[in-house]
Amino acid sequence: MERYWIRGGVPLEGRVTIPAAKNSVLPLMAAALLTRGQTVLEGVPQLADVSTGCRLLTRLGAGVEWEGRDLVIREPREWDPQIPPTLAGAMRGSVFYLAPVLARTGRVTLPMPGGCNLGPRQIDIHLEGLCRMGARLHWHGGKMTLLAPEGLRGIEYTLRLPSVGATETLLMAAAVARGHTLLRGVACEPEIRDLAGYLNRCGARIKGAGGPVIQVEGVSSLTGSRWRPIPDRIAAATFAGAAACAGGRITLDRCPADQTAPFLDLLEGMGCGVDRQPDQVTVTCAGPLVGGVDLVARAYPGFPTDMLPLAAAVLLKGRGYSRLTDTLFQNRFACAAGFRAMGARVWNRPGGILLQGGLPLWGAQVQAPDLRGGAALVLAALAAGGQTLLADRGHIARGYPDLPGSLELLGARIRRLEQN
Ligand code: EPU
């Protein structure tokens, strides 16, 4: 159990460089298994989920090595296509190993993937798509095994909803399947375009990634390459939100302003100053903020679900009643209990929460319920008077390389306490 001590009410000042996106890096690490030879992912952040990915790759037989901040992945000489329950259960990103391992070895076994408890997180679309491509699915003792000894074949398939993970699974499978694949109703998130960009650099023939229809001409093999994953729009929103909560002025270097736009627009509407340059954003927050908004998270380019708890923390500072709704995950606002412990007026309602902003918050003992909910409680603690003790079962370190360290460099009074 990690514990963070935070004293709120101290304005932030300075610059922070946005790390590479966790949700790009995790599928890219798995996709490297599709390629022959070696892949170098540049500037990979030291996240708990990345360590889990490294252990998973090693377990499958791949060579994994850090060269400074770059992650070098070499294809396995001998494959072990079984993913153990401890690694599968440690992160949702274990599901990304289904398609590459199946495509390379003709079989893969995976216990149910873990990850944040945001409500039911099905994987039926991943499985249905792979089965349409020729795989056979067996369940035994809570594990799934997919078999495709003759390889996978291209398909025409419409996803029943634009799942990010399922789009990535099917993109990886289609890249090396026999023949043509046409995927409709896919997710359009920037991380999908990043994955397709990497695969194309390795020799894949993918068109349309980033839009709702993707076409793939399967190739017989891919060759590893160097790739720099896109910066993390959720981390960018976290730091921008920290400036809004604590006050002050911070510059975000390597900030994808367009992909962070929904969050930056919210801050601007509330009264923060937001200066957007192509690769850099400065957020200034001086006076009181105005809330009273109705935010609904939707698939890209809608307001991102992962930014919703962060937005809630900021809206606690904005005068008025705000309503936040998530259309993707049922349990997005487990952090509401922590907000309430800090004195916030927050009510659960179907699909989300209603909150009254502009009231004072005070430090309290709270618990991080999940990754983004934990980050949202850090933001609320920066806005609160007095001290907060935040207990966290490792959620925050899954998605941020060193959130307390980065905030401390910006002047925040925050410390990671000794583990107990
Ligand atoms: N869904 C299904 N069937 C499927 C797949 C998804 O019903 O086969 C449902 C899920 O149950 C959920 C919804 O579709 O209700 C959206 O799930 P999606 O598959 O799009 O999300 P994901 O791939 O599991 C990724 C990110 C999440 C992010 C979502 C939405 C990774 C490792 N995770 O999850 O990130 O919230 O997309 O953008 O890429 C985070 O970083 O904190 C995080 C949770």
Image (cartoon, rainbow, N blue to C red):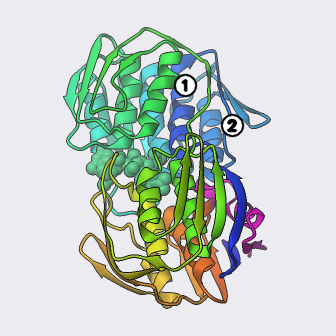
Residue 40 percent location from the top left of the image: 66, 25
**Residue 125 or 304: which is nearer the viewer?**
304
Residue 184 percent location from the top left of the image: 22, 30
Left of 146 or right of it: where is 84? right
Instruction: Look at the picture and state if 262 lies above or below 171.
Output: below
**Residue 151 or 309: which is nearer the viewer?**
309
Q: Residue at x 39, y 76 (%)?
A: 291
**Residue 196, quarter of the rendered image:** top left
Helix, strand or loop under label 2: loop
The C terminus: image quadrant:
bottom right
Helix, strand or loop under label 1: helix
Whether residue 127 is visible here, answered yes or no, is yes
Instruction: Look at the picture and state if 351 lies above or below 199.
Output: below
The N terminus: image quadrant:
bottom right
* Mark 1 to mark 2 CA distance (whole Å): 19 Å
Q: Residue at x 43, y 79 (%)?
A: 336
Residue 215 percent location from the top left of the image: 30, 20
- The tag on residue 43 is 2
- The tag on residue 33 is 1
Q: Residue at x 44, y 41 (%)?
A: 95
Q: Amino acid at mark 2?
A: Gly
Q: Residue at x 49, y 43 (%)?
A: 94
Q: Earlier in the sequence, mark 1 or mark 2?
A: 1
Instruction: Look at the picture and state if 278 lies above or below 271.
Output: above
**Residue 147, quarter of the rendered image:** top left
Q: Is residue 399 magenta?
A: yes
Mark closer to the observer (1, 2): 2
Q: Amino acid at mark 1?
A: Leu
Q: Residues within 10 Å of mark 1 (few under 14, many from 20)?
A: many
- The tag on residue 337 is none
Q: Which residues are magenta?
A: 397-420
